[in-house]
């Protein structure tokens, strides 16, 4: 069900073939239903998908189609009602996943440094490793001047930098991100998208990133799963065979970007107006 848009300005060789990689997350006929006042609400259903190690996936779909619920199932915060979910671990000593939410889910009573170190400290990781990991992502997210600040002293963009730094520093096997840039202004969003990609290109974690922004999905991901409207299921899976490292300004001028954009938009529009 995977489609690829092959055009001469795509360097296909820069995108590794999925066949060579290990399957990291395997969903088979996954579904989640909620019971609300004796009425069944299907959040999502029929989701069968294989995500390979080191891939960057974006899930896009209309509001209410079950994206957040699906991510929460992947995070182990909700149990699926039916189907199976397998997540293949490499290192049982590392946490399986780290989440970044849309709202700034950092602790208001902790400094930036302590927020970023939180997961590592909880796992009682060696002090020297905590120091090394936290400083690495403090630097990569440009937070050097703010390590002793508290969240209330930071702008929205800065708070989201802390969330991202914490997720990477925690060194989980999978990063799960639920519209992390949705509440940021356009400038901050573009800067953080670029910085997220830079970090990711260096450490190649498996990422599942939810967004309702089509441009963001194309810019960031290797693969996009488009979901139908409520109750959500897979409408399409597209491969984004654009070379990396990517630059948003350059990308927007490429025909392939516009083709992908209008294809995904027509699929989503169909769902929204259905
Ligand atoms: N805890 C819950 N209890 C009942 N219904 C829920 C719960 N969480 C989500 N839903 C319902 O499941 C559907 C999908 O929600 P959600 O996963 O938040 O969608 P999205 O993130 O795509 O906007 C919606 O109809 C929503 O009302
Ligand atoms: Mg949501």
Image: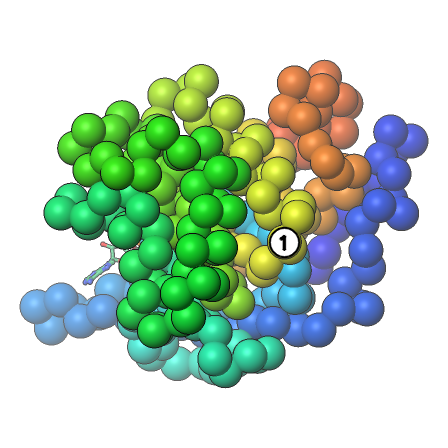
Q: Which percent across, then down, holds residue 191? A: 50, 25
Image-quadrant location for residue 247:
top right
- Residue 196 sits above or below residue 54 on the image: above
User: In the figure, is residue 74 to the left or right of 147?
Assistant: right
In the image, what residue occupies the spot 73% across and 36% down? 245
Residue occupied by mark 1: 203
- Residue 62 sits above or below residue 88 on the image: above
In the image, what residue occupies the spot 32% across and 32% down? 146
Q: Which percent across, then down, holds residue 81? A: 33, 79
- Which of the two residues, 32 or 254, is positioned nearer the viewer here? 254
- Residue 171 sits above or below residue 190 on the image: below
Q: Which percent across, then down, holds residue 91? A: 55, 79
In the image, what residue occupies the spot 70% across and 59% down? 1
- Residue 187 sits above or below residue 144 on the image: above
- Residue 257 appears in the rendering: yes
- Which of the two residues, 250 or 137, is positioned nearer the viewer here? 137
- Secondary structure at badge 1 equals helix
User: In the figure, is residue 160 to the left or right of 133?
Assistant: left
């Amino acid at each position: 069900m995977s489609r690829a848009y092959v055009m001469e300005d795509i360097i296909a060789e820069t995108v590794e073939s999925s066949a060579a990689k290990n399957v990291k997350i395997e969903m088979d006929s996954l579904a989640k239903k909620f019971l609300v006042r004796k009425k069944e609400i299907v959040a999502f259903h029929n989701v069968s998908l294989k995500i390979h190690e080191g891939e960057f996936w974006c899930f896009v779909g209309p509001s209410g189609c079950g994206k957040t619920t699906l991510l929460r199932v992947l995070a182990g915060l909700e149990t699926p009602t039916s189907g199976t979910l397998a997540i293949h671990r490499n290192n049982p000593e590392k946490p399986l996943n780290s989440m970044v939410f849309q709202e700034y889910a950092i602790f208001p009573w902790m400094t930036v440094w302590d927020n970023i170190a939180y997961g590592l400290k909880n796992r009682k990781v060696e002090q020297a490793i905590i120091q090394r990991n936290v400083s690495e992502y403090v630097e990569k997210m440009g937070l050097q001047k703010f390590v002793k600040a508290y969240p209330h002293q930071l702008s929205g963009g800065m708070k989201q930098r802390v969330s991202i730094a914490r997720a990477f520093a925690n060194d989980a096997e999978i990063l799960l991100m639920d519209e992390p840039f949705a509440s940021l202004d356009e400038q901050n969003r573009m800067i953080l998208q670029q910085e997220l990609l830079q970090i990711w290109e260096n450490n190649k974690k498996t990422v599942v990133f939810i967004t309702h922004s089509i441009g963001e999905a194309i810019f960031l991901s290797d693969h996009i799963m488009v979901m139908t409207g409520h109750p959500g299921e897979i409408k399409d899976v597209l491969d984004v065979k654009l070379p990396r490292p990517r630059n948003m300004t350059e990308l927007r001028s490429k025909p392939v970007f516009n083709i992908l954009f209008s294809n995904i938009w027509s699929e989503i529009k169909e769902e929204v107006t259905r």
